[in-house]
Image (tube, grey):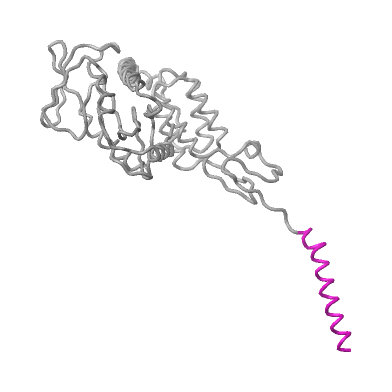
Amino acid sequence: MGGYGFEICIALIVLGLFLYLNYGLRRKKKKKGTYTGKKYSGSPGKASARQKAGWVSPEEFQKWKYKMKPFCYEKELDGFMAFLKSYGGGYVRRNRGKIVAQDFLGKEKGDLKGIFFQVVLPNPNISVLKKEEFRNYLISIGVYGLENKPDYEASTELVSGLAEEDQKRKAVGERGEHIVQVILGKLNPRNYLVIHGAVLRYERTTKEFDHIVICREGVFMIETKAFALTDGKTGRAKLLIEEGDRWIVQKHGRDREVKSPTDQIKQQQELLERIIRSCPVAVHPVLALSNTEITLEQNMKLPYHVIRADNLTDFITGMDDRISVSDQMLIQQDIEKAKRN
C-alpha cells in the first residue's frame, strides 16, 4: 500500500502541473499597455480620438502660453485654441492604462484666464467675434470669472492710444536685438554656440534672454538695449551712468533719464547660473548697446559689463575661462531642458 500511495501522489502532482500549464496560463490577463512618454501602447479598446492620437505633455501648454503675447494676431489665437482642444488638460486619470478622465489643471485655468484679460481682451488685432469665441471656450472648460460679457470696445479703446507707441517701442527693441544678432553671427559657429530669444524656466521663475553664448572662453548672457535708436537707425548720442545707478541718455542737447537695467540683469544671471547645474560655471553678464554710434561715460562700477555692440565679439574672444567641449555640451543640455519656447 505504501508503494501505491507514493505513486498516486506523484500522479496527482503531474496532473496538477499539466492542468496549470494548459489552462491556468491561458486564463492569465493580457499584459497592460505601458506609457512610453508620448503615446499609450496596448490594446486601445474603445479609446477616444485623443487617446489614439497620443497624450500631449503639459510642457507643450507652457510653450504655447509663452507664444501668446500682447498685440498678437487672430491666427496666433486660432492656433492656440486648436492646441487647447487637442491638449485637453494636464490632469489625466487612467483605468487599466486607458484615459477615463481629463481636465485642465487649476494653474492652467488661471493662466488661461490671465491670457484672456491681459492679451486677448484689450487686443485691437483680434475681432470681437473671435474674443467671444475664446471666452465661451474657456467657460466650457471650467475657467471661472468670465461669465459676464465684457465691454470689448471700451477695453480696446483703453489701449488703442498706447498701442501705436508700444508697437514703435517694440519695433525699436527688436531692431536692436537684430543688430546684436547679426554681430554675434560673425563668430565661428563651430566654436561658438549662440542662442537667441530663449525663454528659460527654473522651478517657478521664468525669464527671457536676448542672447546666450557658450564657448571655450566662457558663458555670456547678453541683454540688449536700443538707447537712442531712431526709427531703428543708429545715431550720435551719449549714455551717462552716474552714481546711484542713474542712467541718462543725451541726444540733440536733451537729457532723458532711463530705467537702470541692473536688477533685471542680476535676476537673469542668477536664474541662468541655477539652470546650469551639470557644470557649474560663472556666467558673464553683458549689457550690449545696439546703437553703434553711442558713446559711453560710466562713473560707477557695475556688476556686469556695458559694451557697445560693435565691440562685443572682441570682448567675448578676449576672455578665457577654458571651458572644455564636453562641459560646453553639458551646459547646452541644461539650457535646452529649461527652455519653454
Q: Nearer the viewer, residue 144 or 225?
A: 225
Residue positioned 25% across, 14% down in the render:
229
Q: Is residue 230 visible?
A: yes
The quadrant holding residue 66 is top left
Q: Decide if residue 116 is on the left or right side of residue 26.
A: left
Image quarter in which the C terminus is found: top left
Q: Decide if residue 325 is on the left or right side of residue 95.
A: left
Magenta segment boundaries in residue numbering = 1-27
Q: Nearer the viewer, residue 205 or 239?
A: 239
Residue positioned 17% across, 33% down in the render:
302
Q: Is the residue 53 above or below the residue 180 in the image?
A: below
Q: Nearer the viewer, residue 26 or 124?
A: 26
Q: Is residue 158 visible?
A: no
Q: Is residue 130 magenta?
A: no
Q: Is the residue 24 above or below the residue 184 in the image?
A: below
Give residue 178's position: percent from left, percent from top: 34, 19
Give residue 277's position: percent from left, percent from top: 36, 45
Q: Main secondary structure of the magenta part?
A: helix
Q: Is residue 8 magenta?
A: yes
Q: Nearer the viewer, residue 266 or 309?
A: 309
Give residue 237's position: percent from left, percent from top: 18, 14
